[in-house]
Image (cartoon, helix red, strand yellow):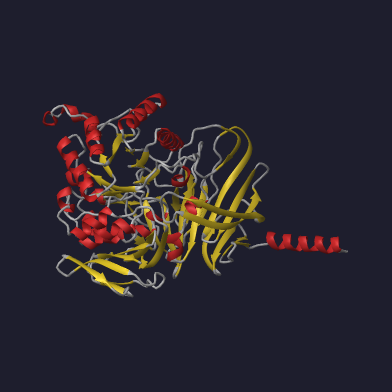
Amino acid sequence: MRKLISALLFLGTSLLLNANPATSPNGKLTAETTGNKLVICFEGQTVLQLADIPFDQLEFVRPVSADYRMLEGKRLHCTNEASEYQAPIGKYARIVMRLYNDGVAFRYEYTNLHNSKVPAERTSYVIPEGTKRWMQQWSDGYEGFFPMTTTAEVKTLAGFGGSFTTNRINTHWGYPLLMEPAEGVFALITEANIERRQSASSLFNEGELFSVVQDQNDLLLSGDWHTPWRVVIIGKLGDIVESTLVTDVSEPANYTDTTWIHPGVVSWIYWANNHGSNDFSIIKKYVDMAATLHLPYVLIDAEWDEMDKIAANEGKTIEDAVAYAISQGVKPLIWYNSSIGWVDGAPGPKYRLNKPEDREKEFAWCESIGVAGVKIDFFSGDTQANMDYCQDLIESAARHHLLVNFHGAPIPRGWQRTYPNLLSTEGVFGAEWYNNVPHFTEKAARHNATLPYTRNVIGPMDYTPCAFSDSQHPHITSNAHELALTVLYESGLQHLADRPESFLAQPQAVQDFLGNLPVAWDETRFISGYPGESAVLARRSGDTWFVAGINGLDDPQTLATDLSFIGKGKAQLFADDASGKWKISTVKKLPAEIACQPRGGFVLVVRP
């Protein structure tokens, strides 16, 4: 009788787990098949539908948990849990779907392949017209705006940096895509865990149907193969901003010795000069600035291979520049052209990394002269060949104890966990564009207030923030707005954009702030805001909280700053006055709100 009761209990539990809907551990998310659609709900509200699904019903497989540590990111200790389900798709394929507490991740797994082409993707998201969404038109460098719209009928941007609008309706979209399907409920669509033999993907739409399309992959596959994880982060805005789901589903670090990996702030030469680093005297100024501000790194940008050809350098070479930085206690990073994207007419050095033997030789030389890391630029999109090349570069760099920053590159998709020496990636329409196009000036504040909810959700973002002076085109965001970006934006290598003369002319309190700025955070909390309007985040390093907020509007705005979770502490406030000058003060009581100037901002540093 006891065995019979146990068997009945097991059968009842199994039927309960296998019945629709599939449910996340905290019960907030459900996924249920209805006809040929999979309906995903958050707290009972429909958030997203997958159309034309190739399976009937999801069956429970097992609980899944994530518990790991990062060297940089929103938090150093990450945890999450999920309920994993699966369903067969024919004889040799299945979908595996995990319902996490803050989203859904699924992938297609195939067995018994025999010299086969990559299977066609079967994922299509339904985004009804009228739904608010923030979408970026696809480009191989993921450098575009995320304007809010309620329709897919958006005309294609063209020209340098999307400087004019064509008459053609755009149908190709890059990740991430943020939407608000119900008031106060959001979903962010992306992907994660690109592995060998895989391309990345993007979205193509026909009306309301947004289909996942894998980029070029010419391999013929045998044995087992699976797609990357298709990821949808779901919940309130705080759930989106604070989520680590992209790394939760990514492979753990593939090497254990990470003692040589140190995130940090970088002085950066390109923004002010709109040029590379073939002038030894300019490099020296940026090294000296880094030493004065106590920044750990300096980036020696493009064209350093031409340094010995410039008469004014008096024979100085890149090795002299590296040696000078080291002598001042500053660790040098140097730039390379990937030589697969922009090559003709582009700066060098070129073709030094493409062949494995050349790459190993180059990175061994970097290590031998004291280079701490490499910035590799000008990639050419999401193809399988590019994805493998990126992983080749990171792994080779790790063998020679080199940090990596990808520029002109696709967005992060979880490699920051798998390869801890990959500390940042551009893949963003950042401050560099003050060099290139005049229209960035007017749109920057709103764009800046959108990125914490879109691009920076999925991984480190080398926006190159914080400029108090002007580059080729002026900026009209305030000084406090610019300072706030250094906290608001997460990047394991935080490149400061402005020229030395500008940084060293700032009040001593601002200089001290930059010299003590963390870039790896123990904890991140969303405080308030709305995409394109404002953003307030609190990040903790040790026992100190850095609270940053920006106003994305052209009018004054008061931002909510409920910091009751911090408790009491001594605080320093960096803000603007109406004339645009610094307003720096000591705060005895943490404010419930802070008034911001048009396109303004603030930083509040709270110490116990």
**453 relative to 471, above or below:** below
Residue 375's x, y, as percent? 32, 39
Residue 490's x, y, as percent? 36, 54
Apparent side of residue 431 relative to residue 505 in the rendered image (left or right): right
Apparent side of residue 103 relative to residue 482 in the rendered image (left or right): right
Residue at position x 21%, y 42% in the image:
287
Q: Is residue 435 visible?
A: no
The image quadrant of residue 130 is bottom left
Residue 236's x, y, as percent? 46, 66
Q: Is residue 277 visible?
A: yes
Extreme-top residue of the structure: 357
Apparent side of residue 174 relative to residue 290 in the rendered image (left or right): right
Observer-nearest residue: 452 or 114?
A: 452
Observer-nearest residue: 292 or 357?
A: 292
Observer-nearest residue: 153 or 120?
A: 120
Count of labels in the image? 0
Q: Identify the image quadrant of the N terminus.
A: bottom right
Extreme-left residue of the structure: 312
Extreme-right residue of the structure: 1
Residue 327's x, y, as percent? 23, 37
The image quadrant of residue 527 is bottom left
Residue at position x 34%, y 71% in the image:
561
